[in-house]
């Protein structure tokens, strides 16, 4: 016989279970907009059945005893997480590069009337103008001012590139801090999750938080992860453990004493990390390769300009110079900090500008014409480019790099987004779905309550309505 | 496909942002009138614009050089013409004096006039343009001739004054006093001396010398004229080139306003549609319809 009050127990379990299911639904609704949250479902299952002891057992079988919540599970696809992080590593890298290229792109200030290209053109024109009136000191003064503008633009551009390089190193340090911080959070979550799992419970929300941290980490640096049987996630960078259960290592930024190149090294053993992905990799590439390349081109341009102009200028005579040998004055000089400037003696006295190829002939402008002619001479790129064409190629190349970095970023962003959407399809909360679930659980609850009334009435009949024969 | 609620609002926001960014870019182009705002907008276009700007800067400077050269050539031509007029007058009166039928006071008048022509020629040969002696070669700070009028000495050198009129093309714009003017001055002095001495043979020799000097002067004038027309030609060539370079640059750099404005209104419609979709799409769910 099924126990009389067992029926009430079955219905009580039903009421409790539907309530738990409503609780889970409420949690989902509450977290519909929580980043990184995976929807949870109450996995319902039957409780162990009751076997009725009878004389002819095979014919009657077991009677069910109701429902219970077996577990609360989070719905999430692990392989989508892996895909997402692979793309996020690329995205982090291209974002870091784009940020710097975007600044550079603006700093170059081309095409414009106030860029370095325009300053070069004015410089060459200035020498021809002096050649038109070599005796005229104000014309010489005007040329010196044009040359100073050119030097100033050069210096400004070069210093801004240097600043961007420092900025890249600074951001790399910030990334290292971020990585270390995330590593510690993951380690601490590992410990908590293992504890909860050991007690046989599902730490869904803790696991969501950890997954979100792993997403963030992927933007900063490329990692591989493994899950241990007890539920911890170990994180490795190029084979070296960043997080091992609840233990962490840390990264710091170091600079090569010879090349000045930046890199990440492990705090524990001082070995350098081969970083290939994530924002850190983008920043290292900008700092060690791209920005030095840009700087190198600018300096090659500066050095050629200085060498060629000075070589011609040294052979000339100013208005007041007497022969027979030329005074050998430079036009430009490079200061120890790398800045370019016009020789102060010339700024102070433009008549010293060596325009003539012989002393005492103020109408001679051979040197001025030779320097103006430099504009057309193939002095750069092993005799393949003029100073101007070298500069044009340089601008186009930086522009192309900036364009490619931005295109990479856009491409990577949409890939990352597409995978995140697929993740959201699986893990995201749908309020419609939760509404339907609420209705479903509410109706089940109501039905169980009604069934309980039936049992109650049955018992009432049994207890209060029987054994009253003949009354 | 399962659609989560957050996905819908994210998609709406993403689309609004992207449409706003596109709109912003076209608005920026319309506002600035420029298609290329930074090298990454169009790297090759940027390099082309830079190159065309360089070309234009050079054309402008060459046009300025040509202007300067023209004023120099004009001054040269005027000076030579004035000396030329002097020579012709000198030849006439010397010829009259050589006829030998003149009264002494008339001969004195001729001698005085020759003296005046000579002084005028020296003065003209020492013409300055913006403070520069144009017949002194490269010694532009020195008068071309000095010394007594009847024995002038050339003070300049034979150095050329050149102007750059095109890439790699220079033109010499000066004529030096020693070849162009000195024979004239000498012939004038010779004529004056012959008239003063009343020596008909010497006067005839002086007339021959004046003829030779006249030839030298004409040669110089012809050269100046030739350079002048070369400059004219080059100037009109450069001006035409400047126009076509400017047009080419504009094709690369300037915004096609009609197209940009039409793009803008299309993008604006799309943007407004995405906003409208957002305002309707974010809010409702099944909850809105449950009692």
Image: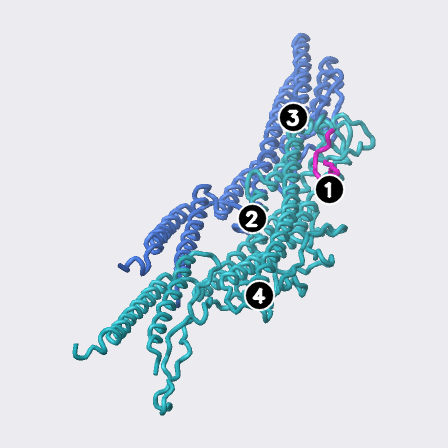
Chain colours: A cyan, B blue
**Residue A468 versus residue A161: which sits nearer the camera?**
A468
Q: Give SS at disc 4.
A: helix
Q: Nearer the viewer, residue A71 or B210?
A: A71
Q: Earlier in the sequence, mark 2 or mark 3?
A: 2
All told, the count of numbered labels is: 4
| Pointer 4 residue | A194
Badge 1 crowding class, 10 Å Cα cut-off, few under 14, some 14 to 19, many 20 or more, is: few
Mark 2 and mark 4 lie on one chain; the one further toward the N terminus is 2
Instruction: Point out the residue furthest to the right here.
Output: A324
Task: Point out the stretch of residues depicted in magenta.
Answer: A332-344
- Direction top: furthest residue: B105
Is residue A466 at least partly visible in the picture?
Answer: yes
User: Could you tell me which secondary element the residue under label 2 belongs to?
Assistant: helix
> Dot 1: what SS?
helix
Give the residue number, with chain letter if any, for mark 1. A308
Q: CA distance from mark 2 to mark 3?
A: 41 Å
Quadrant where the C terminus of chain B is found in the figure: bottom left
Q: Chain of mark 2?
A: A
Q: Which residue is mark 2?
A: A102
Instruction: Indicate the chain on which mark 4 is placed.
Output: A
Q: Position of residue A18 (x, y in %)?
A: 36, 67
Do badges 2 and 3 share one subunit? yes
In percent of width and height, residue A387 lies at: 66, 45
Tell me, yes or no, if residue B219 can be seen here.
no
Q: Residue at x 66, y 17 (%)?
A: B120
Q: Which mark is residue A138?
A: 3
């Amino acid at each position: 016989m099924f126990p009389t009050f067992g029926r009430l127990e079955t219905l009580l379990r039903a009421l409790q279970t539907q309530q738990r299911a409503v609780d889970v639904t409420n949690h989902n609704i509450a977290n519909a907009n929580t980043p990184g949250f995976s929807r949870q479902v109450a996995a319902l299952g039957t409780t162990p059945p009751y076997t009725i002891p009878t004389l002819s057992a095979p014919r009657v079988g077991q009677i069910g005893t109701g429902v219970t919540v077996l577990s609360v599970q989070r719905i999430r696809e692990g392989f989508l997480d892996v895909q997402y992080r692979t793309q996020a590593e690329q995205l982090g890298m291209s974002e870091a590069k784009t940020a710097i290229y975007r600044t550079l792109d603006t700093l170059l200030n081309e095409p414009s009337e106030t860029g370095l290209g325009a300053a070069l053109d004015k410089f060459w024109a200035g020498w021809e103008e002096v050649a038109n009136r070599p005796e005229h000191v104000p014309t010489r003064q005007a040329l010196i001012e044009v040359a100073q503008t050119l030097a100033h633009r050069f210096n400004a551009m070069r210093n801004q590139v240097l600043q961007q390089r420092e900025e890249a190193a600074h951001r790399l340090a910030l990334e290292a801090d971020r990585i270390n911080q995330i590593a510690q959070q993951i380690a601490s979550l590992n410990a908590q999750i293992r504890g909860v799992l050991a007690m046989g419970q599902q730490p869904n929300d803790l696991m969501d938080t950890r997954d979100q941290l792993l997403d963030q980490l992927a933007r900063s640096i490329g990692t591989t992860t493994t899950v241990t049987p007890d539920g911890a996630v170990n994180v490795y960078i190029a084979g070296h453990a960043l997080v091992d259960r609840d233990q962490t290592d840390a990264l710091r930024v170091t600079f090569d004493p010879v090349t000045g190149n930046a890199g990440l090294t492990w705090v524990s053993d001082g070995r350098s990390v081969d970083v290939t992905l994530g924002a850190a990799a983008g920043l290292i590439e900008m700092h060690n390769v791209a920005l030095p390349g840009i700087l190198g081109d600018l300096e090659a341009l500066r050095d050629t300009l200085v060498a060629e102009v000075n070589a011609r200028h040294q052979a000339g005579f100013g208005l007041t110079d007497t022969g027979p040998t030329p005074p050998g004055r430079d036009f430009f000089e490079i200061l120890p900090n790398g800045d370019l400037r016009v020789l102060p003696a010339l700024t102070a006295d433009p008549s010293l500008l060596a325009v003539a190829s012989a002393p005492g002939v103020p109408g001679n402008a051979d040197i001025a014409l030779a320097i103006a002619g430099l504009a057309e001479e193939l002095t750069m790129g092993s005799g393949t480019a003029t100073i101007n064409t070298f500069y044009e190629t340089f601008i186009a190349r930086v522009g192309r790099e900036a364009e490619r970095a931005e295109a990479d970023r856009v491409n990577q962003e949409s890939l990352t987004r597409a995978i995140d959407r697929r993740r959201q399809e699986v893990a995201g909360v749908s309020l419609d779905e939760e509404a339907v679930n609420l209705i479903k659980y509410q109706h089940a609850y109501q039905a169980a309550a009604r069934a309980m009334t039936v049992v109650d009435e049955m018992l009432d009949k049994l207890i209060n309505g029987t054994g009253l024969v003949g009354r | 496909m399962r659609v989560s609620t957050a996905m819908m609002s994210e998609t709406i926001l993403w689309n609004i942002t992207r449409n706003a960014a596109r709109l912003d870019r076209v608005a920026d182009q319309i506002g600035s009138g420029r298609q290329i705002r930074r090298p990454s907008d169009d790297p090759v276009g940027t390099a082309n614009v830079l190159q065309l700007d360089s070309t234009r800067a050079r054309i402008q400077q060459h046009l300025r050089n040509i202007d300067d050269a023209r004023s120099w050539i004009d001054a040269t031509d005027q000076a030579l013409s004035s000396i030329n007029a002097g020579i012709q007058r000198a030849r006439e009166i010397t010829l009259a004096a050589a006829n030998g039928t003149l009264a002494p006071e008339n001969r004195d008048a001729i001698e005085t006039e020759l003296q005046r022509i000579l002084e005028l020629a020296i003065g003209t040969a020492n013409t300055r343009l913006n403070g520069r002696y144009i017949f002194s070669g490269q010694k532009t700070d020195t008068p071309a001739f000095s010394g007594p009028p009847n024995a002038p000495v050339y003070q300049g050198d034979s150095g050329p004054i050149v102007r750059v009129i095109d890439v790699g093309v220079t033109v010499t714009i000066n004529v030096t006093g020693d070849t162009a003017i000195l024979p004239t001055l000498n012939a004038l002095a010779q004529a004056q001396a012959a008239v003063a001495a009343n020596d008909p043979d010497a006067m005839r020799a002086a007339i021959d010398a004046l003829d030779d000097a006249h030839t030298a002067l004409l040669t110089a004038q012809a050269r100046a004229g030739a350079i002048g027309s070369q400059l004219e030609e080059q100037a009109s060539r450069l001006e035409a080139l400047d126009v076509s370079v400017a047009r080419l640059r504009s094709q690369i750099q300037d915004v096609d306003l009609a197209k940009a404005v039409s793009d803008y209104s299309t993008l604006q419609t799309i943007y407004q549609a995405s906003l409208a979709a957002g305002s309707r799409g974010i809010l409702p769910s099944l909850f809105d319809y449950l009692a």
